[in-house]
Amino acid sequence: MVKAQAFAPGNISCVFKIIPHQDPRFMHSLGLGFTVREGVRATLSRAGRQEILFNGRSIDFPTVSGALASLQAPPLRVDLQTPLPLSCGFGLSGAAALAVVHAADALLGLGRPREELAMAAHVAEVEQLTGLGDVCNQHHGGCLLKLVPGQPLRAARLAVPARPIYYRYFGPIHTRQVLADPQRRARINQAADQALEILKGQLEVPQVDFEACIRLSRVFADQSGLLADERVVQAIAQIEATGGAGSMIMLGNAVFSNRPFAQAQETALCAHQARVLG
């Protein structure tokens, strides 16, 4: 095989609780999130030296490099393509790492189980502090609720059908800065505990009220102290003034909603999961 391609979806995190652990295999997050139609397509080929391109431009991407190193992969050319913005809350570090390990497994004929590949991407994310829970969602696909500490790849899929989602991003938030701050982590977890108590009830209903989940995410964003950018605050207020539900995308200065709003782009909640292409 000369080249291999794989895809992993973007992920929007609505509520998250940080589960710390010294072993990166067991550090992760609980909470609610969902995968979207767009994501990262990774094309890999053998090379004399490792090179990573992001939408055609050379990039230093330690999360991707770390995931490949865990597979003991030889030097590869990695071409990452995505229409989604980096560092704006779409889980692109996790998507890139997950797509890359799937493509590397196919290219090199490693035959690793899906869960092992997902764990390689998850550990690389944790080690680089670029994310805690995106890979789990991208591994499974859909609208997912995570409630079990110590099991980073365990999630329950909620009964939420595919639907349009509207979003607008204003700028990045660097996940590393949030995850490395003990005071911010404590406030986030306190707000998350309240939200998770409510979300547990969604596992038993035949049809989840997704709009209510978005409104709960908005409460979490506010109580956690993450909802701080005035542009995001104003966009959510405008959505709510028209009867819609909107919240902040975790972690990014970005907004998502169940209804169109000013200067929003459209995507869709869908159940696509990480997979090899072609």
Image (tube, helix red, strand yellow):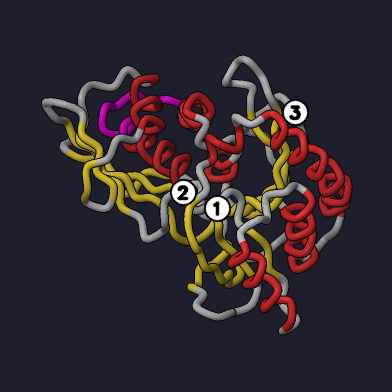
User: In the displayed image of the protein, which residue is found farthest to the left?
Assistant: 48
- The numbered mark at residue 87 is 2
Name the residue at 46% across, 45% down: 274
Q: Are marks 2 and 1 in contact (CB under 8 Å)?
A: yes
Q: Residues within 10 Å of mark 2 (few under 14, many from 20)?
A: some
Question: In the image, residue 258 lies at what x, y percent?
Answer: 65, 72
What percent of the width, then of the height, locates residue 26?
A: 64, 22
Q: Return the mark for residue 149.
A: 3
Q: In 3D space, how far apart are the residues under numbered discs 2 and 3 (Cα atoms)? A: 26 Å
Neighbours of disc 3 within 10 Å: few (<14), some (14-19), many (20+): some
Where residue 256 sits: x, y (%)? 60, 65
Q: Nearer the viewer, mark 2 or mark 3?
A: 2
Q: The disc labelled 3 sits on which kind of residue?
A: Pro
| Mark 2 or mark 3, earlier in chain | 2
Q: Can you tell which quarter of the image residue 18 is in?
A: top right
Asked whether 96 or 234 is in front, the reply is 234
Q: Is residue 225 above or below residue 17?
A: below
Q: Which residue type does callout 2 highlight? A: Ser
Pointer 2 or 1: first along the chain:
2
Circle 1: element type: strand
Q: Which residue is nearer to you in this view: 47 or 177?
A: 177
Q: CA separation, marks 2 and 1?
A: 7 Å
Q: What whole-number distance in Å separates the C-alpha atoms at marks 1 and 3?
A: 24 Å
The boundaries of the magenta stretch are 104-115
Residue at 68% across, 55% down: 227
In the image, 176 versus 123, the foreground residue is 176
Say which residue label 1 marks.
252
**Amino acid type indicated by mark 1:** Gly
Instruction: Inspect this view and state whether residue 152 appears.
Output: yes
Picture layout, residue 177 above or below residue 271 = above
